[in-house]
Image (tube, helix red, strand yellow):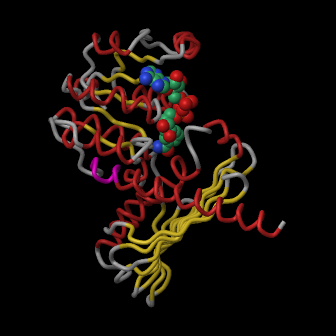
Amino acid sequence: MDRRDAPRVAVVGLGPFGLEHLRQYTDLGVEVVAVTDTDSGRRAAVAQQFDVAVVDSFAALLDRKPAAVSLVTGPEGNRVLVPQLLAAGVPVLVEKPFAETPADAEFLAGLRGAAQLVRPGHVLRYDQGCRQVADLVGSGAVGRVLAIDAERHRDTDHARYRPQHSPASLTMYHDIDLAHWIAGAHPIELHARQAGSGSVLAVMIRDARDALWTLRSSWTLPTGQVRERLRITGTEGTLVLEGSAVHLLDRSGDHVWPVIGNPLRTELAEFCADVMVGRGPQSVTVADAVTCVRTVAAIEELCHEHAHTEEGQTHDRS
Ligand SMILES: NC(=O)c1ccc[n+]([C@@H]2O[C@H](COP(=O)([O-])OP(=O)(O)OC[C@H]3O[C@@H](n4cnc5c(N)ncnc54)[C@H](O)[C@@H]3O)[C@@H](O)[C@H]2O)c1
């Protein structure tokens, strides 16, 4: 990307994923005018490692007049900072989870200018494999969608995200959005089970078009390991996204599309391109983010209720 064709951006939140935004913008050739974090230790570490202006407050970052901002703080930061960015008219990419509660999500989505200026960070909408699956479903390649089955497993180090996050709000969030996008329908009926002190989660959902979603996520793998798989079963065939390929299995055989690319880089490049022409989000809306937050909240409530029922039964038996 030529610097002249890109907005001057800023990054708020300098944890591992904020640094990933910083690296991707830099690799894309986009000028990063400032970065900040409330944690002075993280600010100091970034100032040492990166050739970027590290400022000590959000106000100082706004003074640098970024044309666009990545918010990579987690949902508490989103609730406080999105209103300020909208008041300043600055387009913002808001990393997931969009909000901690449905009420916060609806508040942010209802702010003046949100539909145009706020881009929820749903990175898999920019993943080549997921886009291929969505396109094939959209073109009718598998007929009517009957079932969506997704697994997304992460390592035990993810426990560091507690108590603010859970496998539902951090990991299954991706599959809730994927299923909602691909099925084109909202969840109607939910069942959820968790185990391992909440590090293993299994969910069944029936959507408004009567498709069944089975989603499983965990934080139980050894350090650094990741496993994920997506299957869509339709009336005419099945799609499988696993590893670096999409397979369409139908009566004419096994059709394979290789998957390449870096979804975060694509997301940031499309964000920058849209900001340059004053275009709002094309691939994902604030309403999509509200659906994810509502679904996560419903799953967590069900897990909580189920845990209490089990606890009651254990006490009854003892
Ligand atoms: N899309 C993805 O695939 C993906 C992957 C990893 C993380 N994420 C999301 O990115 C976010 C950050 O992840 P992380 O691993 O870097 O988390 P992290 O908690 O390590 O880092 C967040 C940073 O934001 C800072 N912060 C919080 N509130 C702030 C505020 N108001 N102003 C300035 N700084 C503030 C914190 O001090 C912290 O340094 C999370 O919401 C996470 O869910 C998304």
Residue 239, given in percent of the width and then of the height, sits at: 47, 74
Q: Locate residue 84: give its quadrant.
A: top left
Q: Farthest bottom residue?
A: 251
Q: Where is residue 287 in the image (x, y as percent from the top left)?
A: 28, 52
Is 141 covered by the magenta stretch? no
Please provide percent x and percent y for residue 143. Answer: 34, 83
Range drawn in magenta = 285-290
Q: Left of 121 or right of it: where is 256?
A: right
Q: Residue at x 84, y 66 (%)?
A: 318
Viewer-proximal residue, 33 or 202? 202
Horizontal and vertical percent position of residue 189: 43, 72
Which is nearer the eye, 316 or 10? 316
Count of picture labels: 0
Q: Quadrant of the N terminus?
A: top left
Query: Is residue 109 in view?
Result: yes
Residue at 34%, 9% in the rendered image: 60
In the image, is 34 to the left or to the right of 165?
left
Quadrant of the rendered image containing residue 141 = bottom left
Relative to 111, is 56 on the left or the right? Answer: right
Q: Where is 49 relative to 87, above or below?
A: above
